[in-house]
Amino acid sequence: MIRYRLICSQDHEFEAWFRDSAAYDGQVKRQQVSCPHCGDVDVTKAVMAPGIASSANSDKFAEAKAHEVARRILSAVGKLRDDVEQDCEYVGDQFADEARAIHYGDAEERGIYGEATDDEAHELEEEGIDFIRLPGRGQRRDN
Ligand SMILES: [Zn+2]
């Protein structure tokens, strides 16, 4: 079943259901579809105004979509950080040293989290040590 928005020759708009588009064509041709307001059988499909999207609208849509995606990412990061803080050991600014020690088997293997400077993070990356960076909670100490 499909629903068409129809309009009669007197500009009355109404909706009607048809089995398919061929059924619509046949019933209109045989004048079996009449306007519920005036009984007119001279009906055609009405133009669907909302189907015509202006570029301004689609820009707004894209922007809203981008905001929604950003909000979801931030919310996912927040949840990830909550999980990390619950399951992992906080090592503060010793993060790089501890991550390295765990990687080379000098410390017990466990989940840790803490702070690292950009240089430290870069060194860890170069040594192939797995870690993920999360957007900071407030200002990070870069000393
Ligand atoms: Zn009518």
Image (cartoon, helix red, strand yellow):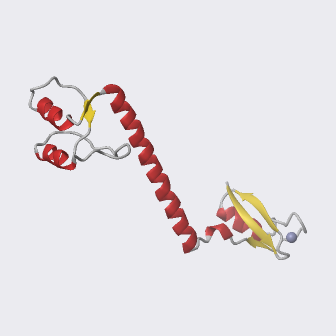
Is 17 or 57 nearer to us in this picture? 57
Q: Residue furthest front?
A: 143
User: As drawn, is 47 to the left or to the right of 79?
Assistant: right
Is 8 or 32 nearer to us in this picture? 8
Q: Quadrant of residue 38?
A: bottom right
Q: Residue furthest top?
A: 108
Q: Residue 3, how many percent across, how many down? A: 70, 58
- Name the residue located 68 percent from the left edge and 56 percent from the top edge: 19
Q: Residue 52, how many percent across, how many down? A: 61, 71
User: Above or below — where is 83 with respect to 50?
Assistant: above
Quadrant where the N terminus lies? bottom right
Instruction: Tell me the quadrant of ligand 1.
Output: bottom right
User: As drawn, is 84 to the left or to the right of 27?
Assistant: left
- Name the residue located 39 percent from the left edge and 33 percent from the top edge: 82
Is 122 or 40 nearer to us in this picture? 122
Q: How many marks?
A: 0
